[in-house]
Amino acid sequence: IRATAQAAKTASAEARVEMDNRLKDLQGDLMKAERELRVHQERQSRDLSDAVASAVAVEQERHSALQDEVGRLKEALASRDSELVSAKEELQAMSSAATQRRDESQSKLSSLASRVRELEEALEHSAATLVEAE
C-alpha cells in the first residue's frame, strides 16, 4: 500500500511538474501571441495612419489645385468684366458722338434748307424784277 501510495505520490508530483511545465509553455505561447498581436496591431495602425495621411495629402493637393483654378477663373472673369465695361463705355462714347454728329448734320441741313429757300426767294424776286424791267 505504501509503495502504491508512494508511486501515486510520485506520479502525482510528476504529473504536477508536467502540468506546470505545460502551463509555463502555454503562458509563454500566450505571451508570444500577445506580442505578435501587438506588433501586428501597431503595424496595421501605422499602415492605416500612413494611408490616411497619404489620402489627406492627395485631397489637400487636389483642393489646392482647385483653389488655384478658381483663382485663375476669377481673374479671367474680372478681366472679361473689365473688358466688357471698357467696350460698353467705348460703345456709349461712339453712340454719343454719332448722335452729336447726326444732330449737327441735321442742324446744318436745316440751315442749308433755310438758305436755299432764301436764295430761291431772292431768285424769284430777281426774276420778277427782271421781268418788270423788260
Image (cartoon, rainbow, N blue to C red):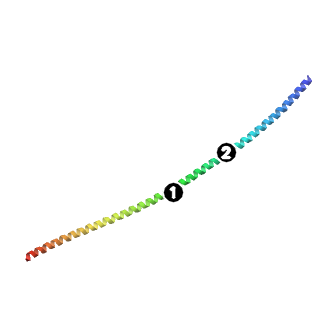
Relative placement, left or right, of 50 versus 93 is right
Residue underneath mark 2: 45
Q: For mark 2, give the secondary structure.
A: helix
Q: Quadrant of the N terminus?
A: top right
Label drawn at residue 60:
none
Above or below, comparing residue 61 to residue 82 in the picture = above
> Which quadrant of the figure has residue 16?
top right
The residue positioned 86% from the left and 28% from the top of the image is 12
What's under tag 1, amino acid-wise?
Gly
The residue positioned 30% from the left and 67% from the top of the image is 101
> Which quadrant of the figure has residue 82?
bottom left
Q: Could you classify mark 1 by the number of other residues whose Cα lies within 10 Å: few (under 14), some (14-19), or many (20 or more)?
A: few
Above or below, comparing residue 58 to residue 23 in the picture = below
In x, y percent, where is residue 71? 51, 57
Q: Are marks 1 and 2 in contact (CB under 8 Å)?
A: no
Relative placement, left or right, of 87 versus 2 is left
The residue positioned 58% from the left and 53% from the top of the image is 61
The residue positioned 69% from the left and 42% from the top of the image is 41
What's under tag 2, amino acid-wise?
Ser
Relative placement, left or right, of 84 versus 36 is left
Mark toward the start of the polypeptide (1 vs 2): 2
Q: Quadrant of the C terminus?
A: bottom left
Q: For mark 1, give the secondary structure.
A: helix
Q: Residue furthest top?
A: 1
In x, y percent, where is residue 102? 29, 65
Label drawn at residue 71:
1
66 or 1: nearer the viewer: 66
Q: Residue furthest right?
A: 2
